[in-house]
Image (cartoon, rainbow, N blue to C red):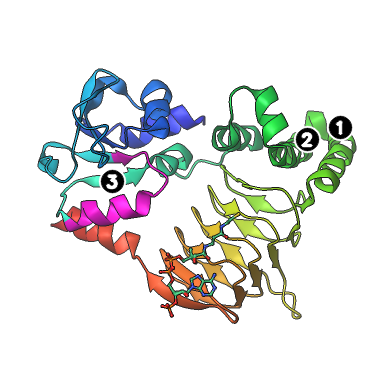
Amino acid sequence: MSARNNVARSLAPYQRIAVWGAGSLGALAMERWLPRERVSAVLDSDPAKQGKPFHGLTVSDPATADLSGYDVIAVCITAYLEAFEEIARRGFRGRFFSIYELMTDTGGQPQSELEKLSIDYLRARNGNLFLTLLSRPQFMTVATYRLTRHCDQTPMLRPLFYVALFFHYLSCAFTKIELPCTVKAGAGLWFPHLGGTVFNKDVELGACVNIFQFTTIGADDSGRMPRIGSFVTVNTGAVVLGDATIGDHSRIGANATVLGLSCPAGSTLVGTPARVIRTQNVAADRAKAAAA
Ligand SMILES: CC(C)(COP(=O)(O)OP(=O)(O)OC[C@H]1O[C@@H](n2cnc3c(N)ncnc32)[C@H](O)[C@@H]1OP(=O)(O)O)[C@@H](O)C(=O)NCCC(=O)NCCS
């Protein structure tokens, strides 16, 4: 299913939708993904945007808006966890999601590698495809990874597998991102920079994972493998090894070494060996908001 279909299906039960974020992501969401006719408000905490028109609606201040008038809030900003905290603090009774969660929620349906690639592209996109490949060549490695897996999984395309694999290896060598095509990655995989990144062939990544440069995600000496949840950011120089389970919406700090550590959703990990310095329990916040 495409990002648009995923968003439409996830928001189908809700009539009154508020959009949080009147920036470029909010604009894209309004233009392409959200059911525009059911969006009744746009909120943004930037005073410069408040009171201005945005896709036919007037931007309001979330601090003073009456959130009880909405069934669901679609958060369309990069720092969505801060918005989640504020929404939960305000005792909002409905549901709230980041736009990336809505885009990647297939309702349990399997997603093809090409469908995942379309969401990878949405995250990498910078103008058109040509400009994206020129300015963000690391997207090429994600694209060849998906295409190689697609050839492998599609019987008719199986003869092209080794051709695709050849180009994928070339792309990995060029971007210095060693991403074996046996890695299982959810949609929206993104490398903000080129270089120095290594994955073990059996690693599993959730949806919308961000991997910065000079990171290693691999096995420990016993061959145990980490599982990285969805919406996780692995920052510069981090090493994640062994039987680690990183909860959704977590951040691994620059140069952290995570050795077989399991952490809940919304964790921030730093240091060597890594320790959890903060947990923003997104799941608990949402449950609290829904039950209030
Ligand atoms: C992990 C990170 C996201 C945490 O950010 P934060 O929540 O704002 O954390 P704070 O700055 O409040 O720091 C909290 C504590 O953790 C420590 N800390 C933060 N990041 C750390 C890191 N990478 N390694 C070791 N300690 C770190 C701070 O010194 C501070 O310690 P203190 O409480 O003893 O003073 C951030 O520090 C980080 O590492 N960002 C990576 C940035 C990056 O790689 N960008 C890519 C650029 S190309």
Label 3: how many residues lie within 10 Å, few (<14), some (14-19) or many (20+)? many
Closer to the N terminus: mark 3 or mark 1? 3
The kind of secondary structure the magenta stretch mainly shows is helix
**Contact, mark 2 vs mark 3 (Cβ under 8 Å):** no
Label 1: how many residues lie within 10 Å, few (<14), some (14-19) or many (20+)? some
Secondary structure state at the residue bearing disc 2: helix
Residue 14 seen by the camera: no
Above or below 279: residue 143: above
Label 2: how many residues lie within 10 Å, few (<14), some (14-19) or many (20+)? many
Which residue is labeled 2 in the image?
Answer: 151
Residue 75 colored in magenta in the image: yes
Residue at 25%, 27% in the rendered image: 39
Which residue is labeled 3 in the image?
Answer: 96
In the rendered structure, which amino acid carries the disc numbered 1? Leu
Closer to the N terminus: mark 2 or mark 1? 2
Closer to the N terminus: mark 2 or mark 3? 3
User: On the picture, is 198 further left or further right than 273?
Assistant: right
Span colored in magenta: 74-89
In the rendered structure, which amino acid carries the disc numbered 2? Cys
Residue at 60%, 75% in the rendered image: 258
Q: CA distance from mark 2 to mark 1?
A: 6 Å
Residue 160 numbered tag: 1
Q: Position of residue 31 (x, y in %)?
A: 39, 21
Residue 125 colored in magenta in the image: no
Residue 254 seen by the camera: yes
**Contact, mark 2 vs mark 1 (Cβ under 8 Å):** yes
Of residues 68 and 185, which is closer to you in this image?
68
